[in-house]
Image (cartoon, grey):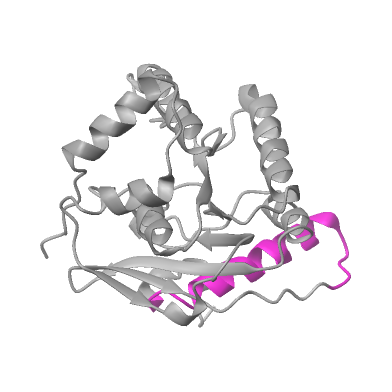
Amino acid sequence: MTLSKYSLPIKFIFKVIVAIVLNGRRSFRKDAQLALSGQHPQCNIIGKENIPPAGPCLILMNHYSRPGYIPIWSAFAISSLLPMESHWLMTYAWTSPNKFWDTFERRLTRILFTSICRVYGFIPMPPMPPDPREISDRAMAVRSLMALARQNLPIAIGMAPEGQDFPGAVLGKPPSGMGRLLEQLFKYIDNVIPVGVYEENNQQVIHFGEPISFKMSEYASNEERDNELSGQVMRAIACLLPERLRGEFSSDK
């Protein structure tokens, strides 16, 4: 099977570089629309009626990826369809554990990605899996995320709870603490929209689900509560994906 190719238009790359050099800010919604004007397969949008008409809202998507497709393409597609600006939680570096070029890749991409975060008002987060040396950076990212949520701005905050790639692009379990983080976000943003992203029939598919209604119960431990809350989110996203991509959140498990 021939996989779709994605490429950014030169105009987009030029505008972002200029903004980085001149310490400028740009609209990610408008730039997402510009980015998609490059080589990009037709997009199949499902659940248009669930696209939030206004903010604040929280967009939770799966971390779909494959060679030639990174999650920024998911963020581009989703943000181009939203009627408001979106601010994403974004990794601040790529890593290649156990590879000799890991240190160089990490340093170079950290410079680039943190610059992109500044241009669009994104929140830079240390990459997964967690590195004990980056615990303070991770805590700072969480504080920034919560501060943004508390402002009750008419925007969308977007994130992929998994935080990393999983083999075969299937859904994976979010890291420990994600359920507790989401619970805190829900205190300030009650419009939570799950989105399933995948490719099918040479198309990018963006499937907006109905707002998540969370069931809060008593749990035996904080770990159990954390797992249940993150599990509710992942099951809501899984329902928007083909069975082959649902992983441990498959309907038959």
Extreme residue toward the left, this view: 2
Relative depth, front residue between 87 and 160:
87
The stretch of residues the image draws in magenta is: 217-243
Q: Quadrant of residue 54?
A: bottom right
Q: Is residue 52 above or below residue 121?
A: below
Q: What quarter of the picture does the C terminus occupy?
A: bottom right
Residue 108, given in percent of the width and then of the height, sits at 37, 20
Residue 10, given in percent of the width and then of the height, sits at 17, 37
Q: Is residue 29 above or below residue 219?
A: above
Q: Is residue 153 above or below residue 121?
A: below
Q: Residue at x 72, y 45 (%)?
A: 146
- Does residue 34 belong to the magenta stretch? no
Q: What quarter of the picture does the N terminus occupy?
A: bottom left
Q: Quadrant of residue 234?
A: bottom right
Visible residue check, residue 219: yes
Count how many numbered circles sit on residues in the image.
0
Q: Is residue 14 left or right of residue 241?
A: left
Q: Residue at x 24, y 48 (%)?
A: 67
- Does residue 236 belong to the magenta stretch? yes
Visible residue check, residue 71: no
Residue 245, given in percent of the width and then of the height, sits at 39, 69
Relative depth, front residue between 180 and 121:
121
Q: Is residue 151 left or right of residue 192?
A: right
Q: Kindly report the secondary structure that dominates the magenta region of the rendered protein.
A: helix
Relative depth, front residue between 253 and 191:
191
Q: Residue at x 39, y 24 (%)?
A: 20
